[in-house]
Image (spheres, rainbow, N blue to C red):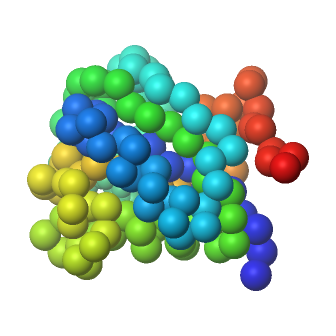
Amino acid sequence: MAIEQTISIIKPDAVAKNVIGQIYSRFENAGLKIVAAKMVHLSQERAEGFYAVHKERPFFADLVAFMTSGPVMVQVLEGENAVTKNRELMGATNPKNADAGTIRADFADSIDENAVHGSDSLENAAIEIAYFFGEEGLCPRTR
Ligand code: GDP
Ligand code: MG
């Protein structure tokens, strides 16, 4: 199986709940390594740019308002099948439909405040990694 990299974002609701460490433990317990991370308070422009694919959706303004309401924690996860594995750990977009034991089932309150983002394909993962870490780059594990 291929080693992949994917973007994870712990959204403002989960940062406010102070569960960054609990969510990180789920990544680590699943064999995913954090190879880059930073906390950022997204500007309107940066949130709109990140979610540009959704700009025609009726919830776009609400999504941008939510994502700029407080700091987020952005990380690159690396490991076998990382894109799919992260999506499985996250659970369904609507926490009401998320499997028991997933991050959204345990930490999210609603479809709009749903705790985490994860890249949905390898192609989008590359775009999202460049969007957040293009200048700083990643930190490959050397030991
Ligand atoms: P994801 O890949 O599982 O995060 O889901 P999508 O890519 O479909 O949507 C992106 C984000 O938009 C979701 O994580 C939600 O935060 C938000 N979102 C999606 N659908 C709705 C909706 O019907 N209403 C609202 N308010 N937000 C939504
Ligand atoms: Mg998505």
Residue 140 position in % (x across, y down) = 81, 45
How many numbered markers are drawn? 0
Placement of 97 over or under 8, stated as above or below: below
Residue 72 falls left or right of residue 31: left
Can see residue 40?
yes
Q: Residue at x 80, y 47 (%)?
A: 141
Identify which residue, 117 or 106, lies in the foreground.
Answer: 106
Residue 17 position in % (x across, y down) = 21, 38
Residue 26 position in % (x across, y down) = 44, 61
Residue 12 falls left or right of residue 138: left
Q: Residue at x 41, y 22 (%)?
A: 42
Identify which residue, 36 or 21, lies in the foreground.
Answer: 21
Residue 135 falls left or right of residue 66: right
Q: Look at the image and tell me in which quarter the N terminus lies.
A: bottom right
Placement of 38 over or under 60, stated as above or below: above
Extreme-front residue of the structure: 143
Extreme-bottom residue of the structure: 1
Can see residue 53?
no
The picture quadrant where one finds residue 67 is top left
Residue 87 falls left or right of residue 17: right
Q: Residue at x 69, y 44 (%)?
A: 35
Q: Residue at x 40, y 44 (%)?
A: 21
The picture quadrant where one finds residue 94 is bottom left
